[in-house]
Image (cartoon, rainbow, N blue to C red):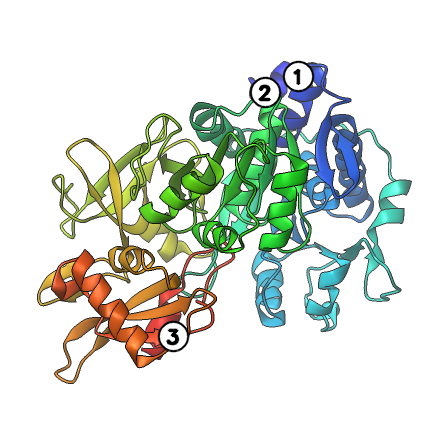
Amino acid sequence: MTDGARRFGDLYNAASDLIGRNLKAGRGGKTAYIVGDQRYSYDDVEALSNRFANLLGALGVGREARVLLCMLDTIDLVAAFLGAIKAGVVPVPVNTRLTQDDYGYMLDDSRAEALVVSDPLADLFPEPLTRHPTLKAALISESTEDRPEFQALTPLMAAAESVFEPAPTRRGDICFWLYTSGTTGQPKGVVHAHEHLIATADTYGAQVLGLRDDDVVFSAAKLFFAYGLGNALTFPMAAGATTILLPGPPTPDAVNAILRDGRPTVFYGVPTLFGMLLASQDLPSPGAHALRLCTSAGEPLPADLLRRWRDTTGTDIIDGIGTTEMLHIFLSNSPDDITPGSTGRPVPGYGVRLVGEDGQEVANGEIGTLEVSGPSAALMYWNQRAKSLETFRGPWTRTGDKYTRTKDGVYVYSGRTDDMMKVGGIYVSPFEVEAALVKHDAVLESGVVGQADEDDLIKPKAYVVLNEGHAPSDAMAEALIDFVAQELAAFKRPRWIAFIDALPKTATGKIQRFKLRANA
């Protein structure tokens, strides 16, 4: 298969494109990934992905079969994801913070023929893997001890050939899956095509981020979900940039060390992490970091958090929204056009509209459900026909997010469809109340849901996580309620405050308000 056929003709393989464009441009010896004190070039990524592709063939895992990847952010995950795609096998990276039951469900739902697990996560798979009848092989990455239920990945990779002819895939062929993060319950397998990866790089990566081959990027968001996959694999590889991977959790100490010592120029985070970094008092100041730009997704970024980040670091955060179904961000602020407290404007290449309950587009200033069209829309939810029909409506994908649009064409988040509250007959956005609460010096973050009062009328209830140095008390609760009443219309103020240690969240940092509602 020629390079031209892979990229522009009927035949196209996403992994061959992402790696091959760097080899063709003479960047084979350039560092593609930094993991701790190890550096891996684009030539290394080519060889390692080829070895994994050959290994899958040796294990009897054929084209269009699924391979479940429960792996930390290491070079092995990069090699496995890209190698599977080269082989025409469908990689399914999954959240590394789930339960045994979750993984059992995903193995059965995907009918995976192979499983690759990072050694620190192996205990999440204690059941006999033989109970999954389609599973042919279970591999363990970075194994430090003998685990008889797994085959060690490293020696198998070393024995495999480093040359591989990519499978004759096409742009519209199924390429990979991602499971939804579960903001509303059971995750769904979101099916994406080969052409979707490069579509996100050509739109958001190139036209909003302006990513270059001299950039060094670091994503606190992990590779196993859509935001992190674009941040740390698709975009930097498409541009020939260098990526820093952090296998462990993105704690403030670990992230601050990378920002200070790794010198990334682009940093991808989520609002909660930006807040934690500011609270850590160890965030590098201007001159002590190399950042030119930061991005945020997962939950809307409060305007006050953006202001404090600017004041501390001297850099901007561009906030945007993406979904697993659309693969990455399709509505965003941009470096030269930031409206604090908003999600910005449509990314070039994507169409956005707001529709009411009657299915018609709403006027500026009115709340509507966000729908999006564009080149990276998923093909379907695996084996969930009814939900696919509900979400994928011709060229439009229904997000379930509520927004308003200003007269200047800027989109402002109002909450999820299931999160909206009617208070006194008027819709109230939980995010608006949360954004007001986080302006208070005592508040780290909050989640707001509706709760019935003694008359069975819905009123806002706030679950609040306090900053260090502040203690829960009735007086604190009253102070926060009064504070919001001064920031917003009085009917939007929380009627109750519950102090908690942490909010329930998905892996992307989205608040799982359905869990808060269950306790309200």
Query: According to the image, label 2 marks what residue?
Result: 7
N-term mark: 3 or 1: 1
Q: Residue furthest left?
A: 425
Labels 1 & 2 near each other (Cβ < 8 A): yes
Q: Is residue 44 left or right of residue 200?
A: right
Q: Amino acid at mark 1?
A: Asp
- Residue at the spot of label 1: 3
The label nearer to you, 3 versus 2, is 3
Query: What element does badge 1 sit on?
Result: helix
Can residue 262 be seen in this snapshot?
Answer: yes
Residue type at mark 2: give it.
Answer: Arg
Q: Which residue: 32% across, 40% down? A: 343
Mark 3 Cα shell of 10 Å, populated few (<14), some (14-19), many (≥20): some
C-alpha gap between disc 3 and disc 1: 58 Å
Image position, residue 402 (x, y; %): 25, 51
Q: Residues within 10 Å of mark 1 (few under 14, many from 20)?
A: some
Q: Position of residue 151 (x, y in %)?
A: 84, 57
Q: Height in image: 211 above or below 344?
A: above
Label annotation for residue 499: 3
